[in-house]
Image (cartoon, coloured by chain):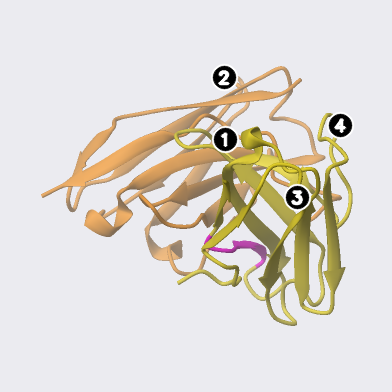
Chain colours: A yellow, B orange
Amino acid sequence: QSVLTQPPSASGTPGQSVTISCSGTSSNIGRNSGYWYQQFPGTAPKLLIYRSDERPSGVPDRFSGSKSGASTSLAISGLRSEDEADYSCAAWDDTLGGPVFGGGTKLTVL
Amino acid sequence: QVQLQESGPGLVKASETLSLTCSVSGGSVNSGGFYWNWIRQPPGKGLEWIGYIHHNGNTNYNPSLRSRVTMSVDTSKSQFSLKLSSVTAADTAVYFCALGIVNIRGWLDPWGQGVLVTVSS
């Protein structure tokens, strides 16, 4: 059972926009920034969004993040087939003293 | 740019100790601005943070694993290590090491490629 809650699956067609949500509590997202990781099968997670809405160098601006209260969201616009992957949210948890994660959302591009 | 690579046995017997090493290149494990994390992912499940260690040896472990976890750092070899004792089938997972940044709480990047550790009975 993951600490953060996100839907197990999401889907969209090429060119569409999709949003994945992630909910936490006051000890994690409610008090700290949200993070998003992209993971392809058999590979390591890659940082996609940090500090809730910032993109590391090299991440396309089709990916954007936001935060409201104890929830954070990842939006992907202009969906492409290569965006088909697992997306996991994360946040620092003050009670744990470390990061907590969502269970991951498998994005399918139809 | 910093790169990390995990190494260690892919098969461990139940009740024994899992030992993994993460080798760091392109950066220094001595940097006070970084902390070095271990994270695992059971097959088909979400990520779980195991703990982190600073270059000075300070550690913070996930309370759910604290009684069985030991982390260490070898600055001369630019490596840090994980030991998890008394393993069971529930410890079967892909184990990743990842870099954290002290001033950006929650930052985990880059990650190593991961190593699958299977606990056998």
Q: Residues within 10 Å of mark 1 (few under 14, many from 20)?
A: many
Quarter of the image where the N terminus of chain B is located:
top right
- For the residues beneath circles 3 and 1, the answer to whether they share a chain is no
Q: Secondary structure at mark 2?
A: loop
Q: Secondary structure at mark 4?
A: loop
> Relative to the observer, which residue lies in front, B51 or B1?
B1
Q: Amino acid at mark 4?
A: Ser
Give the spatial CA distance, label 3 vs label 2.
48 Å
Instruction: Pinpoint the chain carrying mark 4.
Output: A
Q: What residue sits right under mark 3 in the picture?
A: A16
In the rendered image of this protein, does residue A42 appear above or below residue A88? Answer: above
Instruction: Pinpoint the chain carrying mark 3.
Output: A
Q: Quadrant of residue A10?
A: bottom right
> Relative to the observer, which residue lies in front, B53 or A46?
A46
Left or right position of B83 against A98: left
Give the spatial CA distance, label 1 vs label 4.
29 Å
The circle drawn on residue A57 is 4
Q: What residue sits right under mark 2 in the picture?
A: B77
N-terminal of the pair, mark 3 or mark 4, is 3
Q: What residue sits right under mark 1 in the picture?
A: B73
Give the spatial CA distance, label 3 vs label 4.
24 Å
Give the spatial CA distance, label 3 vs label 1.
46 Å
Left or right position of A16 against A95: right
Q: From the viewer's perspective, is the residue at label 1 or at label 4 nearer? A: 4
The stretch in magenta equals A97-103
Q: From the viewer's perspective, is the residue at label 2 or at label 4 nearer? A: 4
Q: From the viewer's perspective, is the residue at label 3 or at label 1 nearer? A: 3
